Image (cartoon, rainbow, N blue to C red):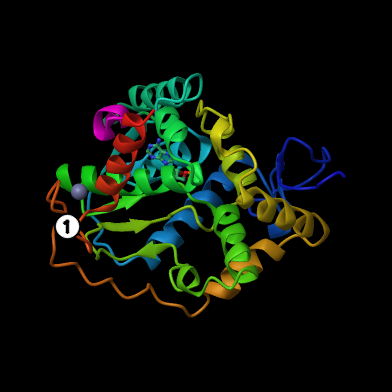
Amino acid sequence: MKLKGPSYGHLSPNAKCSRCRGKAVITLPSHHANFCVDCFLEFFRKAVKRAMKKFPIKPHTPIMVAVSGGKDSLALWDVLTELGYVTKGIHIDLGIPGFSEASREASEQFAKSRGLGLSVYELKDLLGFSLPEVRKLKSSKICSVCGTLKRQFLNRLALQEGFSVIATGHNLDDEASRLLGNILRHKEAYLAKTYPFLPAGGGLVARMKPLFRLESAEIRIYCKVRDIAYFGDKCPFAQGATSHIFFEALEFIESKMPGTKRDFLFGYLDGKKPPQPEETPTGRCSICGAISYQDICSICRIKEELAEKGNSQ
Ligand code: AMP
Ligand code: ZN
């Protein structure tokens, strides 16, 4: 099956830029538009500005950018910097052989090339276990455990470093495929949180997804145009994740009816406001002292479970 999509360079030599009427080199079928490089950059920045406008944060609020070393988070960091936001990157090295070294390297190289500040932490230091060790000891789905660990540690580290908001590189495809999965499985609680900005609350700092209006392929083109050397491999632990199935289903529909993916996500978000902040728990974890709804926080529970399993092996 051949899927048609946004591309850089696959255009007829006479194609004109939809904005300036100059020579077009980029085609975006879902926008029914062709662009020259400058107008594409303008389009991309505008999409991020439009997203940021929707988020209730003050213009000079420092932003902690969660950087994985992949295309999305590096493009995000680049564009926020270009738009004048004060940012710092944060990267968690998960310790996955062959994958984490390259992810970390891409993050560090990018920070260095742009003269940006980056904090790097290792999961092994934060938790006492690397992700391969977690996978060996914990039987439940590794992607969801990894998601919880990243979310919780990114939050704690952001608080520790004095930030009130974290930006992640989730894009239109991530959000649309997650929405499709949650609708198909009637996950009402998750649907209530389907919004690109989640306010601070429940012990968490605010989280935002400034790339939610941009497709993966558009971000890939942005990286090419902006000379961003990202690490493109998929996580070796994520093979068979159900999210890929929803992603592929949407890609198929999109190839037949360009623009459907955007209409699906934006139609759903239309008129919605950010969810209400969750109540901040009054209790603290009896082990580590972090703000927690339960007597033991999610990280300490995972730690305890891993320690128990480790001892019994
Ligand atoms: P993923 O869940 O891997 O698709 O990642 C979604 C977003 O989470 C990325 O765009 C990053 O903003 C952030 N992220 C993922 N992995 C890391 C990591 N190891 N360190 C810091 N941020 C990360
Ligand atoms: Zn704890």
Write the start and end of the magenta stretch as one range: 119-129
Q: Nearer the viewer, residue 9 or 98?
A: 98
| Location of residue 178 (image quadrant) | bottom right
Q: Is residue 216 visible?
A: yes
Q: Determine which residue is flagged by label 1.
A: 291
The image position of residue 54, as x and y in percent, is 39, 67
For the point 23% across and 72% down, the residue is 279
Specify whether tag 1 is near ligand 2 (CB below 8 Å). Answer: no
Quarter of the picture containing the N terminus is top right
Q: Is residue 2 left or right of residue 171?
A: right
Is 308 left, or right, of 74 in this rendering?
left
Q: Quadrant of the C terminus?
A: top left
Mark 1 residue element? loop
Magenta segment: does it hold 4? no
Q: Is residue 214 visible?
A: no
- Out of 148 and 35, give the one closest to the viewer: 148
Residue 181 lies, with reference to residue 7, above or below; the image says below
Q: Is residue 299 above or below residue 260?
A: above
Q: What residue is shown at x 44% (from left), y 25% (from top)? A: 100
Magenta stretch holds residue 122:
yes
- Where does residue 119 sit, x and y in percent of width and height? 26, 31
- Asked whether 98 or 7 is in front, the reply is 98
Q: Where residue 244 sits: x, y (%)?
A: 65, 48
In the image, farthest residue toward the bottom: 271
* Residue appearing at x 58%, y 47% in the figure: 39
